[in-house]
């Protein structure tokens, strides 16, 4: 195992020291609870939006803390859910009187711990909490980590859109409604060229032979639904887009993300994006906004995912709103 770390057991702790050192102009870190927060407290009367989960998916979630996105991100150990105490600490820290929206990816540990934290925050501090569960992965209906579909790439788009809704002053019920619309109309699918190595484990989570790819992977280094011979970028794009369109079944405007899993160079992601765009256009889908790059990763895994979200005027307005975070910035 070759990694730029000091201690396999202290990767998250040491990483948060680096986040604090690099982005002190935008964020601050509660090291006791391993929570990344906006540098300035949530303004009074604004709905606070928080998310979190296992580390190893950077820039998700900590890289999306800041104006126009999250108020806080809770950092579990690598590929491990944060505890209810961590989540409750984040929830109470950012509550500014208008309630808190939890953005939760559909993994069993995350669901359970965010629910417990919401109950504790309500009972101990009277914080009103609403939650949206992201379950956009069309690759599998159930997995080792979930009951139902996994939450993957759509989480990035949702955090941007609902973060903008909260920033402009919408109330908790309105923010929740926007978040539910995104979940209902966005889908993702991913693939891998290699596995990844969790530092504490010291070995890859699965093995791929030369000339093989794993189709339908999640974000925790788990195998996908099918192992296939590696095809061209055009063939891979079709294998990712077709299941998404079969599930969404729509034509019209869309926000699309081609996301790297951590170890794929940008030159290859742009090749995939061009193929995705051509395929979507041939099916009546027009990309009106896009992201290409590493936004929700799986450590050093090579591969990519595609996310397609139906777009309407309100979602586009929220997408275009200013954002200023370490991982995403425009208009601010």
Image (spheres, rainbow, N blue to C red):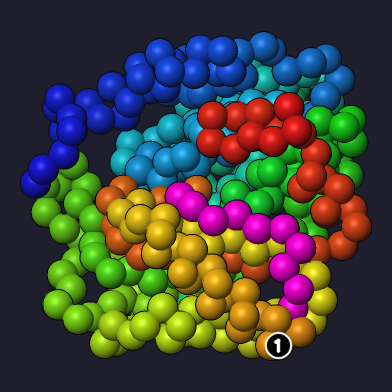
Residue 229 spot, x, y in % from top left:
26, 87
Residue at the image position 41 percent from the left and 46 percent from the top: 57
Chief secondary structure of the magenta portion: strand
What span is in magenta? 285-294
**In the image shown, does 269 or 170 lie closer to the viewer?**
269
Q: Quadrant of residue 243?
A: bottom right
State left or right for residue 106 relative to residue 249. Answer: left
Residue at the image position 19 percent from the left and 81 percent from the top: 211
Residue 286 spot, x, y in % from top left:
76, 73
Q: In which quarter of the image is residue 208?
A: bottom left
Q: Does the magenta stretch include residue 265?
A: no
State left or right for residue 292 relative to residue 324. Answer: left
Element type where label 1 sits in the image? loop
Residue at the image position 73 percent from the left and 27 percent from the top: 332
**Vertical comparison of 54 with 266: above or below:** above
Crowding at label 1, few (<14), some or many (≥20) Cα neighbours within 10 Å?
Answer: some
Residue that mark 1 sits on: 283
**Is residue 328 visible in the rendered structure shown here?**
yes
State left or right for residue 157 relative to residue 58. Answer: right
Residue 93 spot, x, y in % from top left:
63, 17
């Amino acid at each position: 195992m070759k990694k730029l770390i000091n201690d396999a057991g202290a990767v998250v702790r040491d990483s948060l020291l680096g986040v604090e050192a690099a982005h002190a102009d935008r964020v601050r870190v509660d090291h006791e609870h391993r929570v990344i927060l906006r540098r300035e407290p949530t303004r009074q009367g604004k709905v606070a939006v928080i998310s979190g989960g296992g580390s190893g998916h950077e820039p998700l979630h900590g890289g999306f803390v800041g104006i126009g996105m999250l108020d806080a991100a809770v950092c579990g150990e690598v590929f491990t859910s944060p505890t209810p105490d961590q989540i409750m600490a984040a929830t109470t820290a950012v509550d500014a009187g208008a309630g808190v929206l939890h953005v939760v990816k559909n993994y069993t540990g995350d669901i359970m711990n965010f629910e417990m934290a919401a109950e504790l925050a309500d009972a101990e501090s009277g914080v009103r909490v609403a939650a949206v569960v992201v379950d956009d992965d069309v690759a599998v209906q159930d997995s080792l980590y979930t009951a139902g579909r996994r939450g993957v790439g759509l989480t990035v788009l949702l955090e941007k859109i609902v973060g903008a809704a909260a920033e402009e002053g919408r109330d908790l019920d309105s923010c929740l409604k926007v978040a539910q619309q995104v979940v209902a109309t966005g889908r993702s699918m991913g693939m891998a060229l290699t596995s990844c190595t969790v530092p504490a484990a010291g070995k890859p989570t699965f093995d791929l032979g030369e000339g093989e790819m794993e189709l339908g992977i999640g974000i925790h280094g788990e195998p996908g639904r099918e192992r296939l011979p590696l095809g061209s970028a055009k063939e891979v794009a079709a294998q990712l887009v077709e299941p998404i369109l079969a599930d969404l079944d729509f034509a019209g405007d869309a926000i699309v993300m081609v996301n790297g899993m951590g170890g794929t160079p940008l030159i290859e992601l742009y090749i995939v994006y061009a193929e995705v765009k051509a395929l979507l256009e041939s099916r009546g889908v027009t990309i009106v906004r896009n992201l290409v790059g590493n936004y929700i990763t799986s450590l050093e895994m090579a591969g990519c995912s595609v996310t397609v979200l139906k777009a309407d005027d309100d979602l586009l307005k929220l997408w275009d709103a200013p954002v200023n975070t370490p991982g995403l910035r425009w208009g601010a």
